[in-house]
Amino acid sequence: MHNPVTVEVTRGPLVESRHRGLIAVVDADGSLVWSAGDVEAAVFPRSACKAMQALPLVESGAAEAYGFGDRELALACSSHNGEEGHADLAAAMLARAGRDVETLECGAHWSFDQATLIQQARAMAKPTALHNNCSGKHAGFVCACCHQGIEPAGYVGHGHDLQRQIRAAMEDLTGAVLGTDNCGTDGCSIPTYAVPLKGLAHGFAKMATGIGLAPGRARAARRLVDACMAEPWYVAGTGRACTRLMEIAPGRIFVKTGAEGVFCAAIPERGLGIALKCEDGTTRAAEAMVAAVLARFLGDEPEVAAMLAAFSRRSMRNWNGIHVGDVRVTDALFT
Amino acid sequence: MHNPVTVEVTRGPLVESRHRGLIAVVDADGSLVWSAGDVEAAVFPRSACKAMQALPLVESGAAEAYGFGDRELALACSSHNGEEGHADLAAAMLARAGRDVETLECGAHWSFDQATLIQQARAMAKPTALHNNCSGKHAGFVCACCHQGIEPAGYVGHGHDLQRQIRAAMEDLTGAVLGTDNCGTDGCSIPTYAVPLKGLAHGFAKMATGIGLAPGRARAARRLVDACMAEPWYVAGTGRACTRLMEIAPGRIFVKTGAEGVFCAAIPERGLGIALKCEDGTTRAAEAMVAAVLARFLGDEPEVAAMLAAFSRRSMRNWNGIHVGDVRVTDALFT
């Protein structure tokens, strides 16, 4: 099926570029509440499911044993900018398990955030694995292994015990079977599994409500969602969409982006999970879509809805600060 | 109409993201030789038409008067990385007209190229307008004004004499009427006009062959195309697609990218002009498409075609150097 055009990029009086999207809004019983495009399509959630991947850290008791609070748990669910506060906290988490940067298997990269990159280029020869946007998740992985007495070496591998635990949790949440036929390798080298978009949204509804989950998993899931909502800077960083969106309605909106135009979200008080992807993998479109969908389902709160709607329309300015066009959602978001 | 999926991005065994494209290959008589998608759609060429915008620089006699060779003309048609050699040559061009960076109206930005950006961050407090990817084009604009006795101040404005000259040349080349209803503002503040894709391709066939142009314009157009093919590093820079593609078949392929997923090209010996856009504005897809189209029309030269085909399929590796997927063109490029 053709996914509808959900986001337009204008320039002057015309539309310059168009993005197509697939969006699923699902309640905790798994019923589709609203959708656009092919919600049965298998989508790699990439980093958007980091909160799911952090479940073993909490369920195993590692987070409690190491004294992790909201910030550490938020960082374990994050795709961060690699700002100093992010890298330092990842190092501190590893230290609690008696480990350091050498145990991380995520690889190193310069920050994706230009301001941070410029600061890094001036301050260091090159970034370490602690600056990788996934370092918090990987520090959480290492801690989950160490607390359970599992050797962390090779923890990114498909056959490692930790990845088995993550896979089981994700199958429980999404209802999908995760095997080699839907498995790819993520940017940080761990397995990533393509899941029907509707199942992914259902998984986040279950994370936020606990409905359909065993009590221990329900508690762990809500603990992680609450930590992200309480410490949104640790989920992404300065100026980032995840951070800004969660700051709009503190404690009431959970959001997490993933590479290739994915966004997952939950509105715990409404019992809703949201999963969406821009067909072409573009972040600007995924950001506009998630804000518009959140606005739609928080429409009875005019102030919050207005801030979300404003976020869904981004003004583009050129190098001289002149307004040249907008990124805006289409009517497909309002049908 | 629905534009076809022309590029797929794979991860493991699955397609993760899809890009749609519109492609026109036109001969110098304006006949459509091959196409995909809606070639009548109005497309902002953005920087892909810089060689057209440089015509007044040559036609006015300014380039000759200031002693500009291939490098200066290539830089006037460029979207460069802001590497030292680019910024220095833009400054030298301005100096020939008795001007300096202060006359540039393009604004300043850090290099889009990460290696250059890191070097800049270490070497300078902040970039100047000379590092703007459009500084060569703007230096050419200033030179065209000064040589003609036109005050350059305000040269980016829609009503400035230089923009009138550019508009007339682009109407002659593309056959489109350029008015306020199809005019937007580009990243560097000059007007950009949306033109039917087919007309844009025809314009590049005319640039490369001179057919349908007055003798002076034909000479100027070929001079610019030849300069870009002779000095491809000055058209883009280290590692960039425009530079690498023109290096594959020196003197035989002209290519130029534009923002929001546009690529224009010409194969002078075949008398063909090419214009394409990725519907969603993504550069990785436009690069794959232009390489595949060039390979198609140079198919009787196996070595060149093989290098172009290889360029059209890009292997993606993660932070640990592991192969995770590919950017590849679809069968829509081979029908």
Image (cartoon, coloured by chain):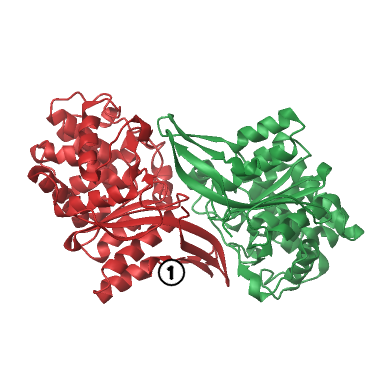
Chain colours: A green, B red
Residue at horizontal 31 percent and vertical 30 percent from the top:
B105
Looking at the rendered structure, the kind of residue marked 1 is Asp
In screen coordinates, is A162 left or right of B191?
A: right
Pick the residue in front: A185 or B303. B303
How many marks can you see?
A: 1
In screen coordinates, is A189 left or right of B56?
A: right
Residue furthest right in the image: A215
Where residue B295 appears, x then y in whole percent? 31, 68
Q: Quadrant of residue B140?
A: top left
Where residue A240 appears, x then y in whole percent? 61, 42
In screen coordinates, is B60 left or right of A281?
A: left
Which element carries disc 1, helix, strand or loop? Answer: helix
Tell me, yes or no, if residue A140 can be seen here.
no
Q: Is residue B174 above or below residue B30?
A: above
Pick the residue in front: A31 or A45. A31
Residue at horizontal 21 percent and vertical 44 percent from the top:
B173
Where residue B69 appears, x then y in whole percent? 13, 47
Tell me, yes or no, if residue B198 can be seen here.
yes
Q: Quadrant of residue A52?
A: bottom right
The residue under label 1 is: B331
- Image mark 1: chain: B
Q: Quadrant of residue A7?
A: top right
Pick the residue in front: A190 or B189. B189
Q: Is residue A97 above or below residue B49?
A: below
Q: Which of the image's four quarters has the C terminus of chain A?
A: top right
Q: Which of the image's four quarters has the N terminus of chain A?
A: bottom right
Where residue B70 appears, x then y in whole percent? 16, 50
Mark 1: few, some, or many residues within 10 Å (few <14, many ≥20)? few
